[in-house]
Image (tube, rainbow, N blue to C red):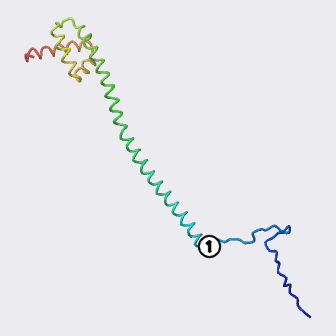
Amino acid sequence: MGVGFNTNVNQHEGEDESGNDFDTSFSVPNTQQQRNAESNTSNISRKRTRVADEMAKQFSIMAKAIADVGPKIDGLVHALSTDINLTEMQQKLDSELTKMEFLSPMDLFKVTNFLAKEHDLLRVFFNMSDERKSAYVTTLLQTWMHNDI
C-alpha cells in the first residue's frame, strides 16, 4: 500500500484563472516602522499640547489686558462727559449770573472768571437753587472785598 503525495507545484501561482497576475504577498509592518509611527503620533500630540498651552497663555494675557483697559475706558468716558458738562455749565454761567440784577458789570466779570476757572465750585453753583446761587455770589463778592481781591 502506498501513500501518495501530490508533488505537483503550481507554477502559475500569482495568476488567477484567466491568467492575470495578482499580488499574493502581504506586508506586515515591522516593529521599527510601528515605533516610528507611534513616535510621530506622540510628537504631534505633544506639539499640539504645547501649541494649545501657549495659545491659552496668550489668550489669558489678552483677556487680562482687556480687563485692565475697561476701567481706563470708563474713566475716559467719565472725563469726557464731565468735560462736556463742564463746557455746558461754563456756557450757561453768564446767563445765570445775568439774572442777578444786583451785580455790576465788573462784579459779573469777576464772578464769571472765577467760577469758570474753579470747576468744582462751578459744579456746586449749578446744583444750588436760584436763591442759594444769589447768596453764594454775594458771599463771594463780600469775601473778595474784605480781602481786597
Relative to 38, residue 92 above or below:
above
The residue at the far bottom in this view is 1
Q: Is residue 70 left or right of residue 101?
A: right
On screen, 102 above or below 72?
above
Image coordinates for residue 26, horizontal then vertical, percent? 71, 71
Taking depth in this image into account, of 111 and 19 the one nearest to the observer is 19
Q: Where is residue 45 shown, x and y percent of the image? A: 52, 60
Three-letter amino acid code at the position of disc 1: Asn
Residue 126 horizontal/vertical position (percent):
27, 17
Quadrant, the C terminus: top left
Tag 1, which secondary structure?
loop
Q: Can you say which quadrant of the picture contains the N terminus?
A: bottom right
Report the label total.
1
In the foreground, 100 or 129: 100
Residue found at the far top of this picture = 101
Q: Quadrant of residue 140?
A: top left
Closer to us: 45 or 13: 13
User: Which quadrant of the structure image shows residue 131?
Assistant: top left
Q: Residue at x 30, y 17 (%)?
A: 88
| Mark 1 residue crowding within 10 angstroms, few (<14) / some (14–19) / many (20+) | few
Residue 64 vs 137, above or below: the answer is below
Q: Residue at x 58, y 72 (%)?
A: 32
In the drawing, does residue 30 fall left or right of residue 75?
right
Frontmost residue, 126 versus 131: 126
The quadrant where residue 30 appears: bottom right
- The residue where tag 1 is placed is 30
Is residue 53 left or right of 133 when viewed as pictured?
A: right
- Relative placement, left or right, of 112 versus 144 is right
